[in-house]
Structures are given as C-alpha cells and as structure tokens.
C-alpha cells in the first residue's frame, strides 16, 4: 500500500482513497473545506511520487498547476509513495542553507570567565560556513554522545569557533570533560552548523529595533547575533539583556559594554536574580525588558536560555505587542497531531548524564 | 424475540411549542432533540421539513431526487432568480457569472492585496486604545470592506453595508408561519423592502455606468461576461443574486471571524498557540465554522419525485431546510460538539454546504478570515476577552456573536 508523508508523519494510503482522507484519518491535518474538488482549500504540493488527479476540475486545479506539481488532496489518489506539503503554507522548505559538515577543531584557549563557566576556542583546519546564532555538535570523547553548543561568532569568524560552556554537576560532557580535562592542543570532533536561530537575510533586515534576552550561557549566540545586527545597521536600537543568578555569573560585561561605544543605539543590561548589587539591575531579565520598553510593536526579539526563561520572554514580548512572527527562540517540534511537543535539543545546557 | 417493532412515528408534538424567538436565541437544544428523535422532521413554526444530521443534510443536498428551492421568507426577500433557489440553465448561468472572481487561481492573485491593507487600516484605528468591540470595529468591517471593494461598491461606507446585511438578514429569516402556512409576521419584511430600495438607489446608477463603460468590478463583470457583444444581463435578473451577496457574502466572513475568536477565547491555551503560530489560523477558522456555523439554517432543497428518507415519506414537491449548523454538532461525528477545540480530529464539516449549490465563496471567504485574524494577532498579540462584558450569540438562519469586547495592555 502506498505511504504518504506529510507534516513529518508517514501514513498508509489505499490507492483508491483520496490523499486527504488518508491523512485526516491518521490525524494529520490539511486545510480542507468542500471535499468535492471545487474550493481549492486542500491544495498540496507533491514533493515526490505520482498522483492520479481523478475528478479534480480544471477550474480549481489548472493544467499549469498540475504541471507545477500541485494536487487537490481531496481528489488525488496516490499511484506510489508520496511526499506532500500544504500549498502556500509558510515554510522554509527549499531554502538554501549552509551544508552540515564534520570537521576537527583544535583547542586553542580554555578560559574561566565566570563561576562554573568557560570560554573554549576551537581552531579549524578550514573555514566553516554558518549563520550567526547557529550551533554545533561536539562528540564527547569515548562515549559516542554528542552535545550542542551555540557559536558566539559572527559569520566572518569562521576559522576559530567560540563556545561558552557552563559546568553541570555530574554532566557527562561538561563535568567530566569540557570543564575538567579539556586542554589546549586537544582535538575535538565538530559537526555543524545546525539550527535556525538566525537573523533575517540581509535584504530583509530593515534595521528595526531588536531585543535579545539570554539566560546564563544562553548569551553565547546573542553575542554573534548582536554584533552582526549592529554591523549591518550601526545606528539601530538593540537592547541585550543577560540574566544570571549573581555577580559571579556575569561575563563579557566589558566586551559587550564596549559595543555601545561605536553604536549609540546599543544597550547592554546585566540582570541578577539572586543578588542585590549596587549599579546592577535586580530581578528577571524579562521583567527588566517590560520595565524598559513600553511598546515593542515593530521590534524583533531573540530569546535563548532555559525553557522557563524563554517562555517568560515570549510572554513579555507579546505583552509589549511584539508580533509573534518576529519572536525567535528555541523551536519546539510537534511530535504528533495530538498536540504534544518534544523539546528540541537545548543548545546551551547539558542534561545530567 | 416475539415482537417485531413496527416502524413507529416518534411523538413530535413537542415541536408544536417551538417558537422563532427560541430558535434565534439558541437553536441547539431543539436540534439536539431532532437529531436524536427525528433527523428529518416537520417543524410547524417553520412550515417545513428540517434536515438536522450530517447524513440527512448531505443526502438532501446531493441527491438527484432533490433540487434547490429558496425558503418562502428568502424568496419574499430576494425575489427571483436568486442563485440559491434556481436550477438547471439559470443556475448554471448564475454560477458562471459569480465564479470567475472566486476561482482559487483568481483569488490567490488579488486576495492578499485586497484584504491585508483593509485589516491593517482598521487595526490602526484602535490598536493603541487597549479595548475594542471587535464585531463592530473589526470583524464586520473587514468583511464588508473587502467584498464591497471587490464588487465595485468602494463608495458605500462600511456602516451602510453592515446596516444592509442586518436588515436583509431579519427579512430573510422572518420565517415563522401560522397554522395556514401564511407568514406570521408579514410586517417583518417591510424594513428589508426599505433596505432594498436604498440598495437600488445606490446600485442602479453604478449598473448604468458599467453598462456603458465596463469596469473591473465583479458586478460589472456580472453584467457583461459571457454575453453577446453589445448586450448585458438585465438588472432585474442579477438583483436577487446581488442581494444574496449583500446579505450572506457580506455578513458571514464577519460572523466566522468573530465566532472563531470567541471559540479561541474559551480556550486560552489554544488562543496562545494560534497567536504564536499563525500557520494554525486556517485550522482555528475551520473549527470556528464547525462550532458556530455562520449559515446555520438558511438554504433548502425540494423533492423532484416521491422520496423516502430517514424513515419519512416525502411526496414530490416537499421542501426540506438544511440545518448545517446542527449537522456540525452531531455527536456521531464530534465528541463534545459544543466545545471549541482546535485539536479535535479534523473531520470535514458542512458549514459551506454540499452538492451543486455549495458555497461559491469558500476559498475567498477562508482567505478573508485567515488574513483578518493574522493581522489582528500580529497587531495585538496580547488580546484578551473583556470578561466584564457577556458574549451573546444570536440567530437561527445566520448565527454569530452580537458583540465581542476585548482588552489588551498598551
Ligand atoms: C464564512 C463565510 C461563509 C460561509 C460559512 C458560507 C456558507 C454558505 C452556505 C452554507 C451556502 C449554502 C450551501 C448549500 O445550500 O448547500 C452558501 C451559498 C453561497 N455562498 Fe457562501 N458562505 C460564506 C461566504 C461567502 C462569500 C464571501 C461569498 C462570495 C464572495 C459566498 C458566495 C456564496 C454563493 C454565491 C452561494 C450560493 C451557491 C449556490 O446556490 O449555487 N459565500 N454559502
Ligand atoms: S476541499 Fe475543496 S477542493 Fe478539495
């Protein structure tokens, strides 16, 4: 029996049954209305495989559209395995991206920058193309596991990767390796780049105001994003919040404050949740944002950190009326149509092994 | 087993007490009982048979033993030949007249540019107020302005178009009949007649203009398309279908937007999901259409020959009303049908009807509702229902919330 893949699910589809029916039966939703081929709501793009258009009227699905690989899901029968996607739904399918590669990095610096936090620099034999904000996977020696770390680099810093690593008590990668035995000269297997926590393309970036909130080492990708965004539009308004527990957890404060010297629209705001320190904001970084910015309509937002901070950030941004499509964060991918979600690998923290 | 039950006629005397006012306030309890006891039943106050389940509605709407007929109050309001009440060549001609502008390929070409600026402009007027009555300030205006511009009625103000559909609605659904089958409230048509006179005073001069100089508006195309050189369709021939548009096509996308919002407000976590992921808007709208179907019970079919259906013998020439709003609450198809649920198993619904008289505007209407909600959530992602105000639904023929107060932080 042919199988249909749509919405990342594989569904068996009898060849006498319209594609739409089989998907709906399996709980995979496709827009549909009339189910008689007359309204066009159920148009799909057939990415691979063959369909029989059956009774699809030419008025609803013209010859050109058929030639372009469109089908009416409520009419089309599968003649083979199929991959379909809803037509016109926004999605990045087909977007060009930097190829994922396996490379070797040599450790050139291991630096304690804050409590339980290290900066690690990895020199590559050949440059790795990526977009700022993306992450790489490191192979943990001797155990076959991989861990994800965001790049703090801008795109032109493509030969030495900068990672921020926080030690997790008992963590397989951090406690036993990166924050303990890792030494200059060591070779590390790196795969990347991965992820879609990236700026809009340069043509689409109109220099609009931005808010970035990082929790702990969630600061790392924001360091690459903020520097890139300011290089594109040096005058733009950009507020970068770094939320940590105490003063000992802060790092790169001078480096980030210095960005403001050349960029009058840039503000760096460290925020301490557990300590009251003169001259440093107290509380949660998301609350600091809502205190500072009365209206964020037209702004874009970037959030990286522990899931509760990211959720609080989304709420804070929306409260200030930032458009949801302008809010960038860790993506959660739906595992099935019942609506449950599984978190994507978290790029700045490590699970305790 | 010793007895074989006879085909028993259910005792439906309770239907004698059903009133129009009761149906307009809340038709669901009566129809729930009809679905359970008699999915095809004669309802005295309507003077007609009513189909209330998905199976019976679908059969009536698609069977070759039936054809379209307009309800008596509908016919009294629109006159002949309205697209919803004609068959054969006239219906084919009227469909061929309205369809070109509503074809998916054509709609894709214009709908975004038509609707998005209208939605944005409306939002600009109140997005910084922190509160709004969304039915009057957003849902209905997006709907009427978009279709008004498509039809060539750019100069008719939003409030006039809203007033027209409301008055035509009250006339069209003035369905109550007395024991002799006569209209129980004939005076209920008078305001609709006045509305039609106002409509003609505005549209007649436009028809005269477009007759001489064809334009790009839908109504201009209705006059000219498919006609021999130098001839146009007669205005009396197209007016009934103009009224179909000025009532249903103007009103229903507004109903649909508002009902979807009320549904989402009843599930704040689902509202949040849709606000965060605009690709869920079409699904939210689809469930909104099922949950409170805008055209709840407005169209009908008539038997062309004797038919036995759902255990009822219908002689030739028997009208049957299609209660799609009831069919969409059938527990055979939907668990807890009166609950709005974005994630319910996505079965097809009947909110746009079925058969060769199914809605001609499905694709267009779905896009209007989608774009309106996308823009609303983009401008006001922190939208909340104002719980100090009630939401009341009204209508049996056409149904939707009468008002919807919302608040947000500014
Ligand atoms: C959410 C909005 C709408 C809903 C729920 C809706 C629903 C319906 C329903 C239930 C019918 C009767 C189907 C039947 O008897 O089986 C109908 C008929 C029709 N609708 Fe819609 N409609 C909507 C919007 C529109 C719009 C915007 C247009 C035009 C631009 C339109 C054009 C028509 C026409 C021309 C008919 C008559 C079709 C015929 O009798 O051949 N509708 N609609
Ligand atoms: S659902 Fe209407 S064309 Fe397929």
Image (tube, coloured by chain):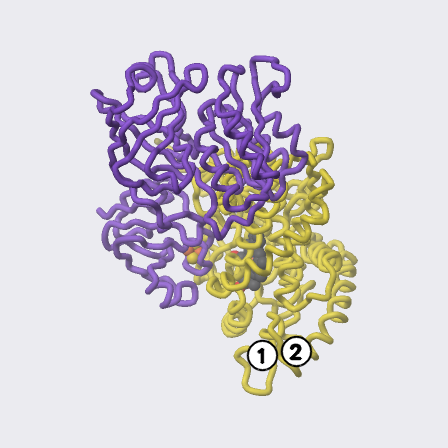
Chain colours: A purple, B yellow
> Residue B149: x percent and y percent?
64, 64
Determine contact: label 2, label 1, CB under 8 Å: yes
Relative to B318, is A41 on the left or the right? left
Viewer-proximal residue among B139 and A116: A116
Relative to B101, is B73 on the left or the right? right
Residue B224's label in the rendered image is 1
Circle 1 residues within 10 Å: few <14, some 14–19, many ≥20: some
> Circle 2 sits on which residue?
B210
Circle 2 residues within 10 Å: few <14, some 14–19, many ≥20: many
Viewer-proximal residue among B294 and B122: B122
Name the residue at the bottom extreme: B230
Q: Quadrant of residue A44?
A: bottom left
Q: Quadrant of ligand 1?
A: bottom right
Do we see residue B321 in this rendering? Answer: no
Q: Quadrant of the C terminus of chain B?
A: top right
Say which of marks 2 and 1 sits in front.
2
Q: Quadrant of the N terminus of chain B?
A: top left
Compared with A210, B165 (above or below) is below
Compared with B188, B332 (above or below) is above
């Amino acid at each position: 029996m042919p199988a249909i893949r749509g919405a990342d699910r594989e569904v068996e589809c009898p060849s006498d049954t319209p594609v739409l029916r089989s998907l709906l039966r399996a709980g995979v939703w496709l827009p549909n209305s009339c189910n008689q081929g007359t309204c066009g709501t159920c148009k799909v793009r057939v990415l691979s495989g063959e369909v029989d258009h059956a009774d699809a009227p030419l008025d609803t699905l013209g010859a050109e559209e058929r030639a372009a690989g469109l089908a009416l899901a409520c009419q089309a029968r599968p003649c083979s395995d199929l991959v379909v996607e809803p037509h016109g739904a926004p999605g990045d399918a087909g977007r060009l991206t930097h190829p994922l590669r396996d490379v070797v990095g040599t450790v050139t610096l291991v630096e304690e920058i804050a409590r339980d936090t290290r900066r690690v620099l990895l020199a590559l034999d050949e440059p790795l193309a990526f977009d700022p904000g993306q992450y790489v996977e490191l192979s943990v020696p001797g155990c076959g596991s991989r861990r994800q770390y965001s790049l703090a680099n801008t795109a032109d810093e493509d030969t030495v990767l900068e990672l921020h690593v926080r030690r997790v008590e008992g963590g397989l990668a951090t406690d036993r390796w990166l924050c303990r035995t890792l030494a200059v000269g060591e070779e590390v297997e790196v795969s990347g780049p991965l992820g879609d926590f990236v700026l809009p393309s340069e043509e689409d970036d109109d220099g609009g105001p931005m808010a970035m909130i990082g929790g702990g080492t969630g600061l790392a990708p924001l360091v690459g994003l903020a520097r890139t965004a300011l290089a594109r539009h040096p005058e733009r308004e950009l507020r970068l919040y770094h939320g940590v527990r105490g003063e000992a957890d802060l790092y790169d404060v001078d480096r980030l404050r210095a960005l403001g010297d050349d960029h009058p629209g840039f503000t760096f705001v460290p925020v301490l949740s557990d300590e009251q320190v003169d001259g440093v904001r107290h509380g949660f970084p998301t609350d600091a944002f809502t205190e500072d910015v009365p209206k964020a309509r037209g702004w874009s937002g970037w959030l990286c950190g522990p899931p509760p901070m990211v959720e609080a950030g989304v709420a804070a941004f929306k409260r200030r009326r930032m458009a949801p499509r302008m809010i960038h964060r860790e993506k959660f991918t739906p595992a099935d149509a019942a609506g449950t979600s599984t978190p994507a690998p978290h790029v700045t923290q490590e699970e305790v092994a | 087993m010793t007895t074989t039950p006879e085909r028993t006629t259910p005792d439906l005397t309770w239907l004698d007490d059903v009133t129009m006012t009761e149906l307009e306030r809340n038709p669901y309890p009566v129809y729930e009982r009809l679905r359970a006891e008699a999915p095809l039943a004669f309802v005295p106050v309507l003077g007609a048979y009513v189909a209330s389940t998905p199976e019976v509605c679908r059969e009536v709407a698609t069977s070759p033993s039936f054809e379209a007929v307009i309800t008596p109050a509908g016919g009294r309001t629109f006159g002949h030949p309205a697209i919803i009440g004609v068959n054969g060549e006239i219906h084919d001609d009227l469909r061929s007249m309205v369809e070109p502008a509503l074809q998916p390929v054509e709609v894709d070409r214009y709908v975004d540019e038509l609707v998005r600026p209208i939605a944005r402009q409306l939002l600009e007027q109140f997005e910084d107020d922190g509160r709004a009555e969304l039915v009057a300030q957003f849902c209905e205006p997006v709907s009427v302005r978009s279709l008004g511009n498509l039809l060539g009625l750019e100069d008719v103000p939003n409030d006039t178009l809203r007033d027209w559909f409301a008055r035509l609605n009250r006339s069209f659904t003035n369905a109550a009949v007395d024991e002799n089958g006569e209209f129980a409230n004939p005076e209920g048509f008078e305001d609709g007649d006045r509305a039609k006179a106002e409509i003609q005073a505005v549209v007649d001069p436009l028809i005269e203009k477009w007759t001489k100089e064809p334009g790009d508006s839908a109504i201009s195309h209705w006059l000219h398309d498919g006609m021999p050189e130098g001839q146009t369709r007669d205005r009396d021939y197209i007016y009934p279908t103009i009224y179909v548009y000025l009532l249903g096509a103007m009103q229903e996308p507004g109903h649909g937007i508002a009902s979807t919002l009320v549904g989402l407000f009843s599930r704040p976590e689902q509202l949040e999901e849709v606000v965060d992921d605009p690709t869920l808007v079409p699904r939210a709208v689809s469930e909104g259409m099922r949950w409170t179907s805008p055209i709840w019970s407005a169209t009908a079919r008539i038997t062309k020959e004797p038919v036995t259906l759902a255990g009822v013998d219908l002689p030739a020439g028997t009208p049957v009303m299609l209660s799609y709003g009831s069919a969409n609450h059938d527990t055979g198809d939907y668990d807890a049908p009166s609950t709005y649920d974005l994630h319910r198993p996505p079965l097809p619904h009947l909110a746009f009807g079925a058969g060769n008289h199914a809605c001609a505007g499905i694709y267009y209407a779905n896009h209007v509702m989608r774009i309106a909600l996308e823009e609303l959530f983009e401008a006001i992602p922190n939208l909340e229902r104002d719980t100090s105000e009630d939401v009341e639904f009204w209508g049996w023929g056409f149904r939707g919330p009468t008002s919807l107060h919302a608040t947000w932080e500014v």
